[in-house]
Every structure is written in structure tokens, then in C-alpha cells.
Image (tube, rainbow, N blue to C red):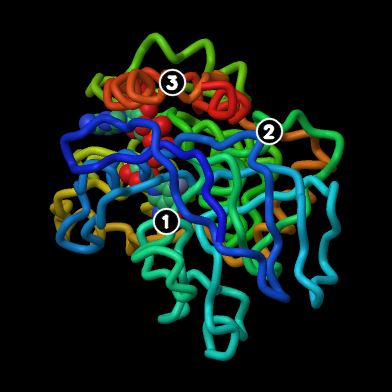
Amino acid sequence: MSNAKAYSAASATAPLAPDNIPRRTATENDVKIDILFCGICHSDLHQVRDEWNSVMPTTYPCVPGHEIVGRVIDVGSQVTKVKPGDLVGVGCMVDSDQACPSCDKHVEQFCSNATFTYNSPDKHSTAPVTYGGYSESIVVDEHFVLQVPDNLELAGVAPLLCAGITTYSPIRRWGDIKGKKVGVVGLGGLGHMGVKFAKAFGAHVAVFTTSPSKKEDALRLGADEVIISTDPVQMKAHAASFHFILDTVAAEHDVNAYLQMLGLDGNMTLVGAPETPLQVSAFALLFGRKSLAGSLIGGIKETQEMLDFCGKHNITADVEVIPIQQVNEAYERMVKSDVKYRFSIDMASLKQG
Ligand code: NAP
Ligand code: ZN
């Protein structure tokens, strides 16, 4: 066991502040990683502020962070996947039983024994719960360590580990979207990655945004058109025209307005996780035989596939790199939808501070 510098929240109302946390000594299957960058996901904010209390209550202190890139500094005797010096990533999971039907199907995120990167019971009993990537180092079972392509800028790679896979996975699962009209609701961390992937797979991409000021950026990121979702005239002009819509909104909103944008047999997949339940009108689904689905991150195999795809097509997140000392301001900006388009924490700042 050793101590690592980290930032943690002591309660749902406390700001994130410097802390020291225990990290286990690498076991034979473990990889110890020196963290270089960690993205800030809206899920970090939901969890830190205990907004998901009814589903996943937060245990304090809470060290968030599940968009991790770093360099391997130590490996256990049985590790074959990576070696010291390798650039690697860790996403939302650090363990699972690797024996159940979900693990067999490479969707470890649905394993009933999955250990999430933070706020999950710690199987190694190093601490009551796992501690995430707002930290100088992390120790992870090798199965959950991803290889990072060496041609990409690392600050922009970190968000691929959650925002990337969370949007890549449902877009892939929805089949061939080439030439089809695909919508992305919300241009934040997830949304801007959704635009990049939908475009990379050849779709005609439209962004639904509540922020008119993001229009130019949406087009630059690859959108073919931008719909201001608060403007009923613009919304009406696109009614019943979409094949697939990815909803990334973090707050309460009217999903029926977007379901009405779907054409016959269209699907809308939710990845956003607002704290309050959403109201769905049956009629918004009945007419047009539409479906509403959900999706949670992606399995390890698919996450590696996504990273390799990003390496090949030169895709990274658009990031604003910040020192960890600015993390609380970043959270406040995220609540105001003022993220361009992901914050990525430069972890060197933690070592200096
Ligand atoms: P984010 O960067 O804050 O982006 C969310 C975007 O939603 C905002 O930028 C904003 O875009 C839009 N928005 C915010 N409030 C809105 C409202 N009231 N009505 C309509 N649009 C609104 O957050 P994120 O990190 O992308 O995460 C988005 C959500 O996905 C969070 O709930 C997060 O917990 C969840 N998540 C889920 C998974 C999963 O596996 N399913 C994984 C990661 C994150 P505009 O300014 O363009 O309107
Ligand atoms: Zn996330």
C-alpha cells in the first residue's frame, strides 16, 4: 500500500479539495499507472453532488475521474498486456468477475460484479470504495487497461475513455448510418464526440442545441446542420425526418419533443442520465412505431476498438486543459453548459500543488 495525492469531495456540498488516498501494491495481475490527464465527465459532478442518490448513492470521501490516460510504471508478475513505459487508458470500470454471461459477451459494464472506477465497493479492501482518476496514480487489473494509440494528443485522448465509448457504442449498434439523418441532442462532452463519430460513419448529422452560440463550433466539429431546440419553427421543420437520435442531455428535458423528430421505425437512444425521471408520451412512440433505448458506456473490447478507430482516423476530444486547482470552477461552468467541449485535467498540476 502507498499514498497518492488526489482531489476528493468530503460531502455532497463540499468543493473538491486536496487529499491523500491509499493505493494498493500491484498484485500479480495489476498494472500501476502514473496518471497524465483525466477528463471531467458530467457523471463526476452528478456523483460528487450525490445527484444519483436513489440509484447510486455516493460514499464520501469521493475521488471522481474515469477518463484516465497515463504511463505504466509497474506491472505484476502475470501481466502480459502492457509493460512499464506504455501509454494506456482506463475508463469507467476497473474490475468484473470475467465469468458471467455479460463478461462472456464483452459487456463487462453489465456484470453484476463489475467494479466501477470510483464509488464502487473495493474488492481489494484498500478503501471502502474505489477512488478514481483525479489522482496521481491508479492500480488496475490488466483486463481493464486499454492501449492508447501513440499518434494522438493525450489531453484529448482521456475523454475517449468515457465520452468516446459512450457515444461510439450506440452509434455502432444502431447499424449502418451512412447517408442517414442522425441527430445528436446536446453539444457537450458526449455530444461533440457523438457528432465526430456519426460523421466518421458517414451520417448526415444534425445537432440539437439549446445554445445558439455553439452553432459555428457544431459545424466545425462536423455537423451538417444545427437546430436550436428552443425554436419551435426550426423543430417543426425537421419533424419525422430522423433515422436515429442520440440524447446526451444531463438535465431534465422534454424527450417527446425529440421523439417527434424521428421518422418511421426511428430510434432515440438515451445516454444522458438526468437525476429526475423523464416523462414519455406513449403517443410519441406509437405513431411511427418508434423506439426509445438506453446505453451505458461500452465493454473493454469495444473500447479498444474505439481507441484504435480514433488512432486510425485521428479523432480526439476538443479539450480545455486545466490544472486540477481549477476543477471546482470547471464544474460550475459545466452546469451552465459552458464546456468547449471537455475539460481535461493536466495531472502534473497535482504533483506541483
Ligand atoms: P455536458 O458536457 O455537461 O453536456 C451536456 C449538454 O446537454 C450541455 O452541454 C447542453 O448542450 C445540454 N443541456 C444541458 N441542459 C440542458 C437542458 N436543460 N435541456 C436541453 N439540453 C441541455 O455533459 P456530458 O459529460 O456530455 O454528460 C451528459 C450526460 O451523460 C450526463 O448526464 C452524464 O452523467 C451522462 N453520461 C452517461 C454515460 C452513459 O454511459 N450512459 C456516460 C457518461 C456520461 P447544449 O448547450 O448544446 O444544449
Ligand atoms: Zn463519464
Q: Amino acid at mark 2?
A: Thr
Where is residue 351? Give x, y as percent: 58, 28
Mark positioned earlier in the residue sequence (2 or 1)? 1
Residue on which disc 2 sits: 316
C-beta proximity under 8 Å, tags 2 and 1: no
Where is residue 140? Give x, y as percent: 62, 63
Mark positioned earlier in the residue sequence (3 or 1)? 1
Residue 124 vs 216, above or below: the answer is below
Q: Which mark is residue 118?
A: 1
Point out the frontmost of discs 3 and 1. 3
Q: Is residue 2 left or right of residue 50?
A: right
Category of crowding for the residue at label 3, using alpha-carbon neighbours closer than 10 angstroms: few (below 14), some (14–19), many (at least 20): some
Q: Is residue 66 left or right of residue 241?
A: right
| Picture quadrant where residue 107 is located | bottom right
For the N terminus, which image quadrant?
Answer: bottom right
Mark positioned earlier in the residue sequence (3 or 2)? 2
Q: Amino acid at mark 1?
A: Tyr
Where is residue 11? Give x, y as percent: 19, 43
Where is residue 108? Give x, y as percent: 54, 74
Cα separation, mark 3 vs mark 1, equals: 20 Å
Q: Circle 2 — which element?
A: loop
Residue occupying the point 68% across, 56% down: 32
Give ligand 1's quarter of the image. Answer: top left
Q: Which mark is residue 325?
A: 3
- Nearer the observer, 281 or 57: 57
Residue occupying the point 32% across, 58% down: 288
